[in-house]
Image (cartoon, helix red, strand yellow):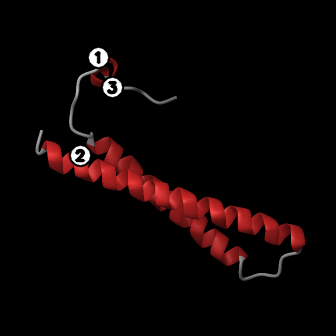
Amino acid sequence: MAVVPDSVDSGEKSAPPQTALRLAHDLGNALEIIMQTSFLLGTIELGDHGKAWHRMLDEGVQKATAINQQLRDVLRAEDRRDGPA
């Protein structure tokens, strides 16, 4: 279960916490592992069902990677807009 800082509970507006940027970076690293695994699965002979599962995995990874990049872009833009804390 995630711990929510008091400033979030009280509704205070603040610059995106470095924690959010770090988490987005860590998510990207985890997605990279999944992408590499998907790539490696594509190098071995899979049956029809295996190929279908691999396609689903690859599509999901691509979508998750794009969403993660959008998240990081938003966090960076907000961080630059708000300036130093």
56 lies above or below 23: below
State the image coordinates of residue 56 (x, y, percent, origin top left): 72, 62
Q: Which residue is mark 2?
A: 78
What amino acid does circle 1 point to?
A: Ser
Residue drawn at 84 percent across, 76 percent down? 46
Q: Choose the circle earlier in sequence order: 1 or 2.
A: 1
Front-most of residues 19 and 83: 83
Q: Residue at the location (58% across, 68% down)?
A: 35
Q: Residue at x 54, y 56 (%)?
A: 64
**Labels 3 and 1 touching (C-beta < 8 A):** no
Q: Secondary structure at mark 3?
A: loop
Q: Residues within 10 Å of mark 2 (few under 14, many from 20)?
A: some
Name the residue at 39% across, 51% down.
71
Q: Position of residue 12 (x, y in %)?
A: 23, 23
CA separation, marks 2 and 3? 19 Å
Q: Amino acid at mark 2?
A: Glu
Farthest left residue in view: 84
Is disc 3 surrounded by few (<14), some (14 to 19) or many (20+) residues within 10 Å? few
- Amino acid identity at mark 3: Pro
Mark nearest the camera among 1 and 2 is 2
Looking at the rendered image, the disc whose residue lies closer to the viewer, 2 or 3, is 2
Residue nearest the viewer, comparing 72 with 22: 72
CA distance for labels 1 and 2: 20 Å
Q: Which residue in the structure is indicated by mark 3?
A: 5
Mark 1 neighbour class, 10 Å CA radius: few under 14, some 14 to 19, many 20 or more: few
73 to 23, vertically: above or below: below
Q: Position of residue 17 (x, y in %)?
A: 27, 39
Q: In the drawing, what numbered circle is on residue 10? A: 1
